Image (cartoon, rainbow, N blue to C red):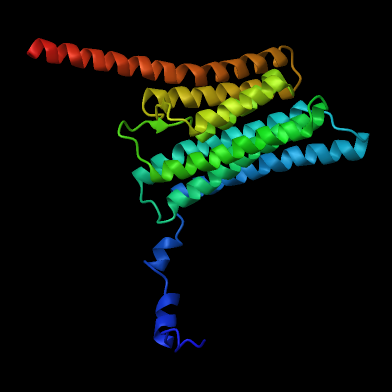
Amino acid sequence: MTMADAGWSMDDMDAADEPRGPVGKAFRLSAADSLSLGNAMCGFLAVCVLAWSAIGQLQAEGSFRPDPRYFATAIVLLLLGATCDLFDGMVARRFRASAMGAELDNLADVISFGFAPAFMVVAWAGFSHRMPMLVALCAAVSVLLAGVVRLARFACVKTKSGDFMGLPIPMGAMTVVSIVLLFQASYLTVAGVFLVAWLMVSRIEYPKPKGNLLAVVLAWIMINVTCLIIWAADLSGGDVLIQIGAAMQIALVAAIPLRVLMFKRAQRKERKETEASVR
């Protein structure tokens, strides 16, 4: 069958090849896009650090052994990526956003908060030798796929309240890391990772970091970075600090939706009482 038989002409082919929309604007990076790219770079470097740790120890000692310095570096990189992700939306709203800003943001999040923490679960299981690799792979894949679904739904579904539907993927990634640090490579770790994956695709609402909550999130990131530096430097109390920080992160993820639910119930109750008094 020729193009003529199919009803196509050269003009149609030329029209199909023409780019849609203003090409110059579409390929012009904004300040927010630079933050998104920084997020992606941090996620990739975190994976590289873990891979270098495994390769280096395998060549030197013939076996895997978790090194706090490498893991702390990888987690700090993820926290830096989370900071970039925290600010790229605000920068996009404050200044002009590019046409591909939302797509860049989602793709960067897949790398930093989907693939990187999933790789960390597998790496930690490989270092410990206390868990079948297939089990760790299943847990890691669940986090990765849940993160992809979470981001796709975020791009398509807008909540009426303005809150996040499901656990935000940066917080999910930090919770996965906290579970790995707190419970080491155990079946409790696997159960916790599966739970985080479910929270990301659930309909449980989490508030967006704005105002005072944004300041709290930034302070929390700085505290975590400090604890990681102390842990990596093998200073006194480093192990205790990292476990306390991990436990607080897990408790925070569990407590926030309960607090939001209680607040909304109180609002509904107050609204009903107001309507009853008016009547």
Q: Residue furthest left?
A: 279
Say which quarter of the image contains residue 135. top right
Closer-to-camera residue (84/267): 267
Residue 178 seen in render: no
Q: Position of residue 169 (x, y in %)?
A: 52, 35
Q: Position of residue 50 (x, y in %)?
A: 74, 37
Q: Give the left or right position of residue 61, taking residue 147 as reference.
A: right
Say which quarter of the image contains residue 9. bottom left
Closer-to-camera residue (104/92): 104
- The residue sitting at 40% across, 55% down in the picture is 98
Q: Vertical placement of 184 versus 110: above or below?
A: above
Q: Vertical placement of 18 versus 108: above or below?
A: below
Residue 58 seen in render: yes
Q: Position of residue 49 (x, y in %)?
A: 73, 39
Q: Vertical placement of 56 versus 6: above or below?
A: above
The quadrant of the rendering that contains the C terminus is top left
Q: Position of residue 27 (x, y in %)?
A: 46, 62
Say which quarter of the image contains residue 77. top right
- The residue sitting at 71% across, 12% down in the picture is 237
- The residue sitting at 66% across, 32% down in the picture is 139
User: How many numbered marks have been drawn onto this rendered protein structure?
Assistant: 0
Q: Give the left or right position of residue 120, taking residue 213 as reference.
A: right
- The residue sitting at 50% across, 88% down in the picture is 2
